[in-house]
Image: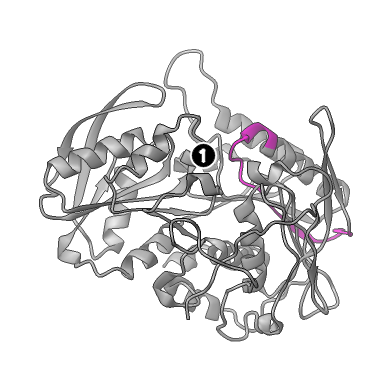
Amino acid sequence: MATSLLQPSSSSSSTMTFSSSSSSLFTGSSHAHALPTLSFVDNCRARILAPCSVKCDMSDSSNFPNGKPIIPVLNERTLPKFLESARAEKTVSRNSNRLKLFSGTANPVLSQRRGMHQFVVTNMTSAEKAYLLNSESSSYLLYWLLEIARYMGLELGQISIKRFADGEIYVQLQESVRGCNVYLIQPTCPPANENLMELKIMIDACRRASAKNITAVIPYFGYARADRKTQGRESIAAKLVANLITKAGADRVLACDLHSGQSMGYFDIPVDHVHCQPVILDYLASKTISSSDLVVVSPDVGGVARARAFAKKLSDAPLAIVDKRRHGHNVAEVMNLIGDVKGKVAVMVDDMIDTAGTIAKGAALLHEEGAREVYACCTHAVFRYCLRPPAIERLSSGLFQEVIITNTIPVTEKNYFPQLTILTVANLLGETIWRIHDDSSVSSIFQ
């Protein structure tokens, strides 16, 4: 059965509570909409012991204005195909003892709410508690936490996050994390500086509360594009941010689809780099597109390696490259196409879509060269924060058959358009966290 997805409903409360006989979980305040009171279904206790739905039931779940569910389920399955064998790998031995997960408030929508925001996760199978904490950063982070918790067999608990009148951030853990492995989930999406500062304060709070290990789970690493000097007298902000996170007290970082692999080397602590390609590939596999009709397109020369890896997973589809010349920040000009797309279904692959200038001009070129349909696939939907409206206009102008993104960054209702499809990476993150906690291989998930 397909999974119905979560959608916020109106409420005046700024605190979320979750009930269960043995669990609770922490959440934050970054959702524009106030959040309802929820409860997990009883069979979430099945956790890892048997394949089960990853759905978090909600009484009033519904579709968004574009007629699609908030996060479409892949292939009408309860679990992405690439995770089925991975989940079965350690079905009995997994133990959430001393496992705690927290999240920041990286969603500006949720950040509009001020005051105390609570999220606690406790262990379903042990008297010891495991915590999943979310602060105010992302509306989709709330959904993540619910789905991650369900995947891991956990429920939600409590943390207090406040904003003072001068903008200062206050964080207090509501329960002990002494001796625990803590995972802080916080993308540094806009407002990047505020969300980054919140993450560092949460790390510091956990460190001063005697957490054993602290892992910063950063689905979107906002400064990853500043990974080198392209002109004189520029900073390398990616390295600076890596140093700040390390100095705050993090012991490990888990990130999704960094802009460049070299960013992992900027951290002086271990980095687990998770690729979201399998989630998108699973979704594309559900479509009735002949492999002989496919061509994978890199929107620029710098993304060729990413597109080539993607093409290999799609029955070794042919590759095309859009050659462009950039004349300034956030300005791109398409020059020509390398490869043949005539009569083909072109799948454009990138790690993020920002102003959508590059990918829109690339799509226009593909149509000029005879492409039958054009799909855009990316992990990070940075366009949600684009200050200039053309980003959404470009994506919804009819150039694309479908724009496929993941929920590493929240997308608010005003940014929905008919071609938009949002896929969840909750299961992927949940499985990765389990493996880190169990000292198991993370790379084997993708093999």
| Left or right of residue 74: residue 175 | right
**Element type at mark 1:** helix
* Residue 300, image quadrant: top left
Residue depicted at 16% across the width and 38% down the height: 337
Looking at the rendering, which quadrant does residue 68 occupy?
Answer: bottom left
Q: Nearer the viewer, residue 244 or 71?
A: 71
Q: Is residue 284 left or right of residue 387?
A: left
Q: Which residue is mark 1?
A: 263
Q: Residue at x 19, y 67 (%)?
A: 290
Q: Is residue 107 visible?
A: no
How did the renderer colour the structure? one colour
Q: Nearer the viewer, residue 447 or 414?
A: 414
What amino acid is labelled 1 in the image? Ser
The prevailing secondary structure element of the residues shown in magenta is loop
Q: Which residues are magenta?
A: 175-194
In the picture provided, is 390 more to the left or to the right than 30?
left
Q: Position of residue 251 (x, y in %)?
A: 70, 49
Q: Quadrant of residue 440?
A: bottom right
Q: Is residue 186 on the magenta stretch?
A: yes
Q: Residue 308: x and y, percent? A: 28, 51
Q: Where does the image place residue 89, in percent across and percent down from the top left?
A: 54, 79
